[in-house]
Image: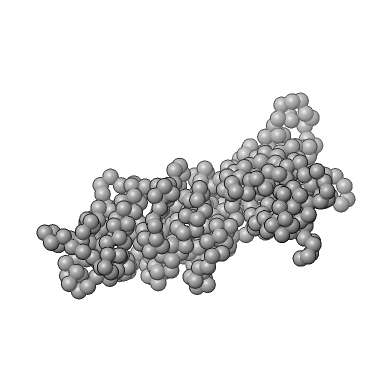
């Protein structure tokens, strides 16, 4: 039995069979959405992966899907971390040229021809972007080097300088330039990046074809340097803003919500004009549907209990009934205790109160593993049709808690580790005074630091504006060995 893999990139071949096709997915598939935002584990990569499994059907309907990143393994953008563009204009030009080149590469593979598209091919070939040995990482390196040269060349006295022998711009191997060239230079075959996009757009219109460039895994690309990440993604949004008016070309950007907040907190004028976006959310009915889809992917279970999968998935009441057929009614028994489904959801929620599918799937797989271990150790079979004994639920939590703490907070926000780690063994609810003592900071500085952790979902802010408290969600409690209750400032 399995509930699948919690990371969408690791189960590309299976994702279509139990993907929850929400209204949000429908908008993305119709092309109404360009920017997909969501918390870590909310399903952005699942949407991306599903799109990539449907490349053929999209092409048949006149849409070419182009991946701008490797689906797994080392990120294409790794080299930019060591040697990043030095200006925003250089970064914007890099994004545009990279998108233009990977579109052209795909169009050639699909044998799209015509005078206008041949103009684009010729310009890119002259800059050595369409080489026979093609790889995304190699292309990005070439584009990066070329972009750096044209930006530097056009900063010299406000224009290009030419080699008198070759009549080519000094230091540039192709005829693609940053600014719109003069009539004389256009006659010699020079073209700006934006004019090549316009020509490409006209060529696609003639071919009755649209192109979507998919940009996922951006949280992985620049994880080691948040300042570079902010610069790169602000430039990407500005490149998107320049391209979005082209009717046949769209950038489809999959971006984590915390990263979006980070790149906009310093100001981003274009943000107010971005209306083609969706923020992924998972209300409880959608999470129950997700659990049931993954549960009912187990053929042996469906056959043994003679379950009509289609009927169950179309009926919310039937889903809840089937859930409690296989799961205990409560994990912690008592009239005031939550039913099992709510217990699962709240244990996987962060400080924002949101529960991501990734943690739910991880917890369910850990519960399965603990149930197997319990039976292997001689534990009694569960009653009736129940698959899991209530005792294994709490035992499964620390693995999920530790993964979330180490693979998200500590891995991506190492500067916060010294504050978070000092909470180990402390009370689950802290006050400004207790944090001040724990972190050796003034009360105001402790509150400022606590607010950072609130933004990261490590804390939930409670209390009043003047007397706030900071409550650690269940998701992080086991990893930090926290104790139930409220801390006092004088506690050691």
List x then y, in percent, for residue 111. 27, 56
Q: Residue at x 23, y 65 (%)?
A: 160
* Above or below, comparing residue 111 to residue 161 in the picture: above
| Residue at 63% in and 37% down | 1
Res 236 → quadrant = bottom left
The quadrant where residue 328 appears = top right
- Residue 306's quadrant in the figure? top right
Q: Residue furthest left?
A: 165
Residue at x 77% of width, y 32% of height: 381
- Asked if residue 53 can be seen in this view, the reply is no
Q: Quadrant of the C terminus?
A: top right
Nearer-the-camera pick, 200 or 339: 200
Residue at position x 52%, y 43% from top?
Answer: 11
Residue 84 placed where, x, y %? 40, 53
Left or right for 24, reference 479: left
Q: Nearer the viewer, residue 177 or 161?
A: 161
């Amino acid at each position: 039995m399995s509930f699948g893999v919690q990371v969408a990139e690791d189960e590309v071949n299976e994702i279509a069979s139990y993907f929850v096709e929400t209204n949000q997915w429908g908008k993305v598939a119709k092309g109404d959405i360009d920017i997909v935002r969501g918390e870590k584990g909310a399903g952005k990569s699942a949407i991306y992966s599903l799109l990539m499994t449907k490349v053929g059907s999209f092409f048949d309907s006149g849409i070419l899907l182009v991946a701008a990143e490797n689906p797994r393994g080392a990120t294409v953008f790794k080299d930019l971390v060591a040697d990043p563009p030095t200006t925003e204009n250089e970064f914007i030009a890099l994004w545009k040229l990279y998108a233009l080149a990977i579109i052209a590469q795909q169009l050639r593979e699909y044998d799209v021809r015509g005078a206008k598209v041949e103009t684009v091919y010729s310009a890119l070939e002259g800059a050595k972007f369409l080489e026979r040995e093609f790889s995304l990482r190699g292309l990005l390196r070439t584009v990066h080097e070329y972009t750096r040269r044209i930006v530097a060349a056009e900063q010299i006295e406000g224009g290009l300088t030419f080699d008198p022998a070759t009549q080519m711009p000094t230091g540039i191997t192709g005829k693609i330039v940053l600014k719109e060239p003069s009539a004389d230079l256009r006659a010699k075959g020079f073209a700006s990046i934006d004019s090549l996009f316009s020509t490409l757009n006209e060529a696609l219109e003639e071919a009755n074809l649209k192109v979507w460039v998919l940009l996922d895994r951006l949280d992985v690309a620049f994880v080691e340097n948040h300042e570079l990440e902010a610069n790169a993604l602000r430039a990407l949004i500005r490149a998107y803003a320049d391209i979005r008016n082209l009717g046949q070309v769209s950038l489809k950007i999959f971006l984590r919500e915390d990263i979006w907040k980070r790149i906009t907190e310093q100001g981003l004028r274009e943000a107010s004009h971005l209306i083609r976006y969706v923020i992924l959310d998972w209300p409880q009915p959608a999470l129950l549907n997700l659990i049931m889809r993954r549960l009912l992917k187990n053929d042996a279970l469906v056959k043994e209990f003679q379950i009509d999968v289609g009927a169950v998935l179309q009926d919310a009441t039937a889903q809840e009934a089937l859930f409690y057929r296989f799961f205990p009614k409560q994990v912690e028994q008592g009239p005031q205790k939550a039913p099992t489904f709510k217990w699962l959801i709240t244990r996987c929620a962060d400080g924002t109160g949101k529960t991501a599918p990734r943690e739910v799937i991880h917890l369910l797989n850990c519960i399965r593993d603990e149930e197997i271990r319990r039976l292997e150790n001689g534990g009694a079979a569960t009653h009736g049709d129940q698959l899991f004994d209530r005792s294994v639920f709490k035992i499964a939590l620390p693995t999920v808690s530790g993964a979330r703490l180490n693979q998200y907070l500590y891995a991506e926000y190492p500067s916060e580790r010294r504050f978070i780690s000092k909470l180990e063994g402390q009370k689950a609810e802290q006050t400004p005074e207790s944090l001040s003592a724990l972190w050796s900071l003034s009360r105001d500085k402790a509150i400022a630091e606590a607010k950072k952790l609130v933004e990261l979902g490590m804390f939930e802010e409670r209390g009043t504006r003047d007397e706030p408290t900071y409550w650690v969600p269940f998701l992080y409690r086991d990893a930090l060995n926290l104790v139930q209750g409220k801390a006092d400032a004088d506690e050691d």
